[in-house]
Amino acid sequence: MKPWRAPLLVAVVVAVLAHIAFVHAYPTLLMRATLRQLGGGGERLHRWLAAPRVTPAARRIVRPAPEFAYSACVYDLSRGALRIRLPASPDYWSLSFYAGNSDNFLTLRDVDHRDGLELLLAAGEAAPAAALRAPDTRGVALIRRLATDDAGWQNVERLRKEDVCTLAAS
């Protein structure tokens, strides 16, 4: 064996292992930082955080679409089930749930919930039977609502006052 082959083989193996470790760890580390930033160290858990109207300078959400209004709710299901309620809306909306590793595990849309939406989200063995199951105890729910003009934005502001994201009563 030539003397340069062994170090090259070691370098290739280390590079492949480092790549695999990065690909598996990065989404979880990124989501932890996002949850920490949005959740304010726990003081902004279990409530909707309404993002301001999107402008070209907005970058809190990666490449936000200016025709959508965004609200996020960081949750910790180790404290109990999460109750979410959204009022009926005449315009498009979607509600997506992201686990602690950034996986989108559930998305609900207006076409399936014309009269609004109410649900429980829980994790673990003690979850109520009626609750939707989350794969992780920590995550974030994200609402996207269509608001293409001032009237649409005013409608979103009205709806946001009725949105609920809170721990369910025990």
Image (cartoon, rainbow, N blue to C red):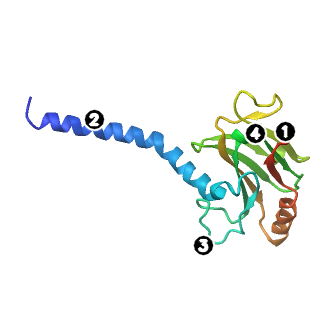
Amino acid carrying label 3: it is Ala
Amino acid carrying label 4: it is Gly
Q: Marks 1 and 4: in contact by CB < 8 Å?
A: yes
Badge 3 is on which residue?
Answer: 57
Label 1 or label 3, whichever comes before in sequence order: 3
Q: Nearer the viewer, residue 2 or 28?
A: 28
Q: Alpha-carbon distance for marks 2 and 4?
A: 44 Å
The secondary element bearing badge 1 is classed as loop
Q: Nearer the viewer, mark 2 or mark 3?
A: 2
Locate residue 121, reporting x and y percent.
76, 39
Amino acid carrying label 1: it is Ser
Q: Alpha-carbon distance for marks 2 and 1?
A: 52 Å
Q: Tell me which residue sits at (88%, 52%) in the image.
A: 87
Q: Marks 4 and 3: in contact by CB < 8 Å?
A: no
Badge 4 is on which residue?
Answer: 80
Badge 2 is on which residue?
Answer: 13
